[in-house]
Amino acid sequence: MRFDIVTLFPEMFESFTNCSILKRAINKGLIEVHFHNPREFATDKHRTVDDYPYGGGGGMLLRVEPFWRAIKSVPGNPYRILLSPQGRLFNQDVAKELVKRGHILLICGHYEGIDERITELVDEEISIGDYVLTGGELPAMVLVDAVTRLIPGALGCEDSPKRDSFYDGILDFPHYTKPREFEGR
């Protein structure tokens, strides 16, 4: 499975991809994670990726040109997802759909939002919930983690994902370790 992530802040993903299940999946060759920083596709000397909204308004928007170029630079034919508040709500069923894609491109917004023309390049918009975050990096991490867990061999036990909460739409049962009794419990 290949994940390409268009983000202004690839450094946010360093610890995320260098520990636990993701690190093992990368080391086993089960997933690849590639980053594309739109600043590398900006044409001015300051590598500008944002601007004021055309027609006025508060906040800064991500410019179409560097993001368009970054998205177009990704090789292959990935399924393109914009992480946005108006997207389809992400859940376990969506993760099960996405693991079948094989190659996913995630586009992380930031600031006030993105130039709407960027949406012409996406196959789908996905949201992880009704709240405001600084950018699309955290939702990208959530999506990559949930999808990676479903790849055969990513977890220690092959049946683990099928026993997880929400795999079949229900919560998991309580679990216990030794000792059998602890402080009367």
Image: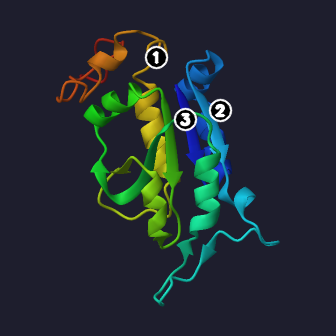
Q: Looking at the rendering, which quadrant does residue 183 occupy? A: top left
Q: Which residue is mark 3?
A: 3
- Viewer-side residue, 109 vs 102: 102
Q: Find disc 2 in the rendering and name its residue.
A: 18
Three-letter amino acid code at disc 1? Answer: Leu
| Residue 176 coordinates in the image, percent (x, y) | 30, 18
Q: Nearer the viewer, mark 1 or mark 3?
A: 3
Instruction: Point out residue 37 in the picture as x, y percentages from the top left corner.
Output: 67, 53
Give 16 or 26, whichever is nearer the viewer: 26
Q: Residue at x 65, y 32 (%)?
A: 18
On the picture, is 48 further left or further right than 106? Answer: right
Question: How many residues crowd mark 3 within 10 Å: few (<14), some (14–19), many (20+)?
Answer: many
Furthest residue in direction top, as rendered: 158
Looking at the picture, how far across and down is residue 110, in whole percent?
53, 64
Look at label 2 and name its amino acid: Asn
Q: Which residue is mark 1?
A: 155
Q: CA distance from mark 1 to mark 2?
A: 16 Å
Most extreme residue toward the left, as rendered? Answer: 170
Q: Quadrant of the C terminus?
A: top left
